Amino acid sequence: ILKPFDLCLLADQGVFNNERLDELTISSSFLYSIYGADRQHSFDNAIASRYPFESCKNQSASFFSDGGTRSILKCHLHDDHPRIENHLFTVTHLDHLNDSNRLKQSKAFTREKDFIDILLGDINALTRDDYSDDYYKKNIV
């Protein structure tokens, strides 16, 4: 399904840590991939790329939420292509069960000095109310 798109980067959340992740990256011609968690966890975030990784960091939330401890995988790619150079690519799976935890996650993950250029992941964690101007002004800005 993905091959015709000739993607440079693929990021996903809730990826199972098994040989199928490796099969997907190889069959899609991605030369590099990183899995967020250590091998003892069953699933986490992952990024596959045609470009090598310059640096990667998996940051876990410091608190437990209803859906488990969440994390964000952050990667800089090593290439001088203008779409790649000096950009921080991230992927996360936000808590979809508890609005308070989701907001705490968002704030914890963006507190670092790193400026997130591209955030990929579980945007469907938001409820209908989360899309209102009032909610945005109160909780996001």
Image (cartoon, grey):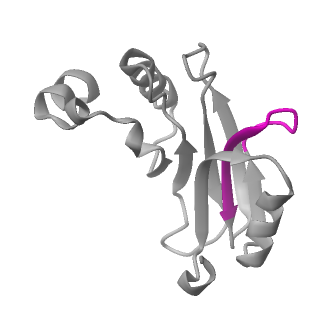
Q: Residue at x 81, y 68 (%)?
A: 23
Q: Is residue 7 left or right of residue 135?
A: right
User: Residue 52: percent from the left, percent from the top?
Assistant: 74, 66
Q: Residue at x 12, y 27 (%)?
A: 134
Report the number of numbered marks.
0
User: Residue 6: percent from the left, percent from the top?
Assistant: 58, 83
Quadrant of the drawing holding the N terminus: bottom right
Quadrant of the drawing holding the C terminus: top left
Location of residue 64 with respect to 40 vertically, above or below? above
Location of residue 18 with respect to 50 vertically, above or below? above
Q: Quadrant of residue 30?
A: bottom right
Residues drawn in magenta:
36-48
User: Residue 66: percent from the left, percent from the top?
Assistant: 54, 17
Does the stretch in magenta take in 93? no
Q: Quadrant of residue 78?
A: bottom right
Q: Nearer the viewer, residue 48 or 85?
A: 48
Does the stretch in magenta take in 42? yes
